[in-house]
Amino acid sequence: MAKYLTSILKKQGTNLAKLHVTQIGGYITKQLTGELDMNDYASHNDESVVKKAFLTRGLATLAVSSLTDTPVKNLAKYVTDGSKDGGIDMIYFDVNERTLYLVQTKWHEDGRGSIELGDALKFIDGVRKVLDNDLSTFNARIAARKSDIEQAVFDANSKFVLVVAHTGQDALNPDVEGPLKDYVASQNDTSELMSLRIVDQGQLHRAVATGLAGAPIAEEIQLRSWGQVREPHHAVYGQVCAADVAAWFASHGNRLFEKNLRQVLAGSSVNQDLVATLAERPQDFWYFNNGITAIASEIKKKPIGGNSTESGIFECFGFSVVNGAQTVGSIHAAFLKNESAVSSAMVPVRIIASSEENPAFSGEVTRYTNTQNAIEKRDFVALDPQQERLRQELHIEGVEYFYKAGSGTGGSGQRFDLTEATVALACANPDVSMSVQAKREISKLWEDINKAPYKQLFNSGVMGPSVWEAVKVLRAVEAELQKVTKTYTGRDALVCVHGNRFIEWASLKVLGVSPHVQFSSIESAVPSVVAATVEKVVAAVKTHYSDSYPASLFKNLGKCRTLATKI
């Protein structure tokens, strides 16, 4: 009897899987007929082969649409599937989010399976070539995405999402998922540069069933130590387990911030600090974080828990985070690294009901909760009396120095600001770690004005005129580096762009920059020194780190120290 029931359930599961695939296929056909480029199949006689190719390509647009809320029709032109595609079926650059999506898809008519190891390895190799800006072996469709690819790979703040989408119910085999995760991890040795998203049949079907961006989000939210405000607008507030917040983002992605002013700013210094706090001090996260503000068209408390305010479950319809997107994204990133730590952290949350009588109110909540003045790490530098001393010394020399935020900016002429001074002093420092930190996250150099690394750059022994001389040298080296970069192509050009601070550090070292050296005495040597330094750095990277993505490589102190010994 047990075997019979198992057989029946298995058959029902198989039938349901096929039904879901049929529904996904129907959606793709309805949305993308006439939208996808199928010219390479124009003379193909086997309709089943053509249909599968069409659905495979449509699947890529559906997967990315579910992750970005971009309509599938708008994504059709980014499909790259075809011969010589390197295992990459779609390339899409989200300009606003500065994120490049690289997609591989597999269509399983029966709703079973996932992807094979060979497919995964081919995909990884294709991605590696794209990140090296080497498109010579790819088809015309990928070549047509050259501008988007270069916009991403030449931007140190861009992120990359590898998307594996399939219509199977099965999870990826560990032997398949392992190489994908290992490759992603190898690119994230200094920051969250790359992520992997597996989009399976269940997620695809949910996206189709909800009409993608068309359906409002509904969430059941458990609030601890909760309270509520009835007038003039209904709102509830309390603490939410950080693991629950991570689940919001995992389920809905950026749809969660549909009514917010911005989405997740991946890689920002604030995000990294949040992730570190969650990993190292989860019990204190509630005390340190400003929390999350959300709106909902309707808020209903479930009867469970009665009138106790210790814990309550609230059904929130039309749920959208309007302030705290960075907190949500950081919690999700931390959860992927350390699930147990994040599960012990609590987050302050308030949910405000948007009133039907006053529909403009929710917009006001979004605007006012996002227009409070934020204090950044560089703002605390204004408390250091050495900065004012430097300003006064430079003022006597006829040079303007701006160290307070909003007081002015430099970049040209007889004026410069804190950022330019910090980079110049970091690149002039004998220790390469300073220039690496300036590249990786310059705000760390201002984190504590009472100790290193800040004190190594700005102290009573640093004179205003010597800072100005270092800035002038840096400007000359930067200008020459831009000229030299134009003579390189492909991966070598990426080394010049992403390795700018390292190259500048190495050049200043060769030039012998010190507090007593005048720019005028070394100005003529700058062109030849920069050209020679770039040549050495490019060669050293080829020899020692040919598999490292340059944007990540030059933020890795250990690797940069090794490179420093090779040039």
Image (cartoon, helix red, strand yellow):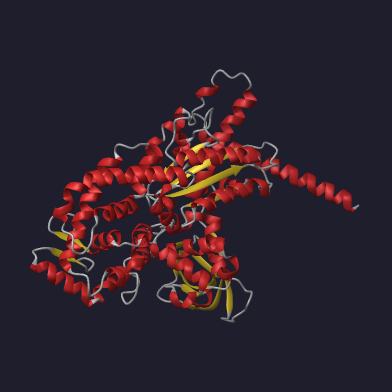
Asked if 442 appears above or below 70 in the picture, the reply is below
Q: Which residue is drawn at 84% across and 47% down?
A: 7
Q: Residue at x 45, y 36 (%)?
A: 78
* Residue 56 percent coordinates (x, y): 58, 35
Asked if 561 appears above or below 379 in the picture, the reply is above
Left or right for 395, reference 437: left
Q: Residue at x 37, y 51 (%)?
A: 156
Left or right for 389, reference 125: left
* Residue 304 percent coordinates (x, y): 64, 74
Pick the front one: 540 or 191 = 540
Pick the front one: 397 or 327 = 397
Residue 545 shows up from this direction: no
* Residue 323 percent coordinates (x, y): 41, 65
Pick the front one: 181 or 479 = 479
Asked if 277 appears above or below 26 in the picture, the reply is below
* Residue 276 percent coordinates (x, y): 48, 68
